[in-house]
Structures are given as structure tokens and as C-alpha cells.
Image (spheres, rainbow, N blue to C red):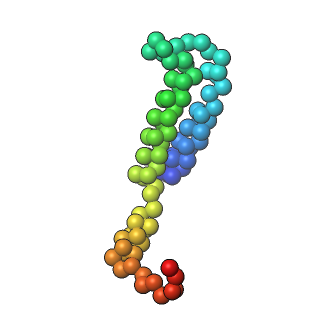
């Protein structure tokens, strides 16, 4: 269920990326930012949050264990490479 909600959240974020409804607006935020630029700044923050959430919830822990094992016991270089 958690993965389904995350997929739905990512699809919603993807749909929000299409900012065609602010393309021709002349409103300004904070006195100097065009609404389209303001929207993109907010969207960038949302994308950062989305990546943080995905990293915290669905990061493959088994890869962390494999990396820790490889770092403890590095493979010997028997290939005769450089």
C-alpha cells in the first residue's frame, strides 16, 4: 500500500510539472517574481521533498549491506589489470 501511495504521489508531482496554466499570467509574487518563476521555485522544493521521501522510504537496504561487505573485504585484483 505504501508503494502505491508513493507512485501516486510521484505521478501527481509529474502532473504538477506541466505549468501551462501560468504561462501567460503577468502576476508577481514577493513584488518581483513572475508567477511562472515562483511556481517553478515551489516545484523545485516539492521535487527535493519527493526525492528525500523516496530515499527514506523505498531505498534498497540490501544494497547498503552488500556495499558494507565489499568495503570490509575488498576483492583481490587477480585480473592483472592496471
Percent position of residue 40, x then y: 54, 29
* Front residue (pair 2, 35): 35
Vertical comparison of 3 with 80: above or below:
above
Vertical comparison of 54 with 77: above or below:
above
Vertical comparison of 57 with 10: above or below:
below
Vertical comparison of 79 with 60: above or below:
below
* Front residue (pair 41, 3): 41
Percent position of residue 9, x then y: 53, 41
Q: Tell me if 62 is positioned left or right of 6 in this view.
A: left
Give the total of numbered labels: 0
* Front residue (pair 32, 77): 77
User: At x 51% / y 52%, what residue is drawn?
Assistant: 3
User: At x 51% / y 32%, what residue is drawn?
Assistant: 43
Percent position of residue 16, x then y: 58, 32
Percent position of residue 69, x then y: 37, 75
| Displayed quadrant of residue 23 | top right
Q: Residue furthest front?
A: 82
Q: Residue furthest left?
A: 72
Amino acid at each position: 500500500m505504501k508503494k502505491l501511495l508513493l507512485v501516486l504521489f510521484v505521478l501527481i508531482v509529474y502532473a504538477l510539472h506541466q505549468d501551462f496554466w501560468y504561462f501567460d499570467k503577468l502576476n508577481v509574487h514577493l513584488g518581483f517574481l513572475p508567477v511562472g518563476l515562483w511556481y517553478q521555485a515551489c516545484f523545485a522544493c516539492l521535487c527535493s521533498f519527493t526525492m528525500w521521501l523516496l530515499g527514506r522510504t523505498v531505498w534498497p537496504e540490501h544494497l547498503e549491506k552488500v556495499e558494507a561487505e565489499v568495503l570490509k573485504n575488498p576483492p583481490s585484483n587477480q585480473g592483472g589489470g592496471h
